[in-house]
Amino acid sequence: MDAFAIYRLPKASQCTLVGQDGVPSSFFSLNELGDGRGFVITPFHVGDALPILLVRPDVIRQCSPDEVLSMNDLPYHLDGQNLPVQPADREDYHDDFCRFHRAFSETGLQKLVLARSEDISHDGTDPARLFARACNRYPDAFVTLFSAPQCGTWLIATPEVLLARDKERWHTMALAGTMPYNGNEDAEWSDKNKREQAFVSQYINNSLGRYSNDVSVKGPYTVRAGNLVHLRTDFSFSLSDDSRVEQVLDELHPTPAVCGQPKQEAHRFIMENETCARSYYSGFSGPLDVNGTTAMYVSLRCMRIFDDRYRLYAGGGILAQSEESLEWDETVFKMQAMLSIINERHEL
């Protein structure tokens, strides 16, 4: 194998390994995937250096998280010694926040998502062990470890479905609005969080209406994801022609939950003004017709694994009434998902 992806679907006990001999195919539009099968890896913004990747299923194997620990032949792509270390730069975040916040009075933007990254040095890592820890710690998340020459090695434990099929129905969700979990899932949500959720829900509902006249909506309601709670709205719908899946993905990605509103203007602003190079963070990944399963998840609660550091990513929705200190704190809470795995001391 020259590239692979191991993933564990939410609440599942078994994992699936998809392995490819040779370099994965690169695409620059989701519509190019066509009838492809395998594991899809998509960045936030597709470009020459950040293509959509498809890990072809030359090898498909079912295994437990513990069995992943004994896979000694996985091809990890960990290069990174020549990259500068990126600390938690509060000053850069302050500058970005001020620039993003000014945009609401200077443009017609209603919401922007501001991301940042932070490096944690290490002197040796076992990605398979981190994957097993993530499966154990986050049973309700989509957990994946993938590695390819074009993208490097990533670990993700995300709560957010972008698009998944269950029998004859398709599903997606609006997951926006975040608070620390304090032992009570009946959270009192601020107007800012409610508005953020409403922007995302409205966008998804409108987008799905272009492809289906059979859309069911449930929510918003509060869900827990590790040390956080979120506001969530579920969407279920039918498609008369499943060949349009790539078009639906292209319509949904990136949703206002990771980008902003209006979508195109927000995306352009982020690309021109955000300090953080998102890479494959806030893109999406998942199996495409692997053993009959298609399930794409937004690449949140994730990190890239280098040979000498972990690069953690987090972001948050910014509205006109947002407060910088609270938004910074939200990114700190979100990074705890990966930090707790890195710092775990028991056998896994």
Image: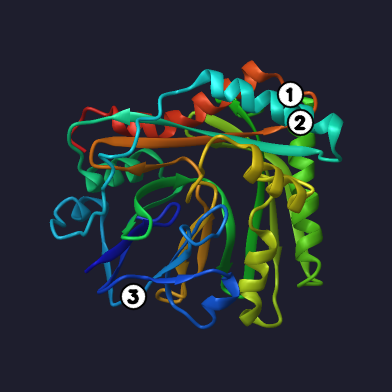
Q: Quadrant of residue 207?
A: bottom right
Toward the top, the furthest residue is 325
Query: Which residue: 54% across, 30% down?
Result: 228
Which label's residue is closer to the chain start, 2 or 3? 3
Judge whether residue 346 can be spotted in this image. Answer: yes
Q: From what the image shows, is residue 212 above or below residue 175?
A: below
Considering the image in quadrants, where does the C terminus appear? top left
Q: In the image, is 335 to the left or to the right of 324?
A: left
Give the alpha-carbon distance from disc 1 to disc 2, as whole Å.
Answer: 5 Å
Which amino acid does the dot numbered 2 rest on? Leu
Which amino acid does the dot numbered 3 rest on? Pro
Give the alpha-carbon distance from disc 3 to disc 1, as whole Å.
Answer: 44 Å
Considering the image in quadrants, where does the N terminus appear? bottom left
- Rendered image: mark on residue 319: 2
Q: Point out the frontmost of discs 2 and 3.
A: 2
Query: In this view of the protein, which residue sits in the foreground, 342 or 325?
Result: 325
Q: In the image, is 300 to the left or to the right of 342?
A: right
Residue 160 x/y as whole percent: 56, 49
Query: In this view of the protein, which residue sits in the foreground, 274 or 147?
Result: 274
Residue 236 x/y as whole percent: 69, 62
Q: From what the image shows, is residue 27 above or below residue 78?
A: below
Q: Which residue is mark 3?
A: 57
Give the alpha-carbon distance from disc 2 to disc 3, as whole Å.
Answer: 42 Å
Query: In this view of the protein, which residue sits in the foreground, 171 or 204?
Result: 204
- Rendered image: mark on residue 257: none
- Rendered image: mark on residue 322: 1
Q: Are marks 3 and 1 in contact (CB under 8 Å)?
A: no
Q: Are marks 1 and 2 in contact (CB under 8 Å)?
A: yes
Q: In the image, is 179 to the left or to the right of 304?
A: right
Q: Quadrant of residue 305?
A: top left
Query: Which residue: 39% across, 35% down?
Result: 338
Q: Quadrant of residue 15?
A: bottom left
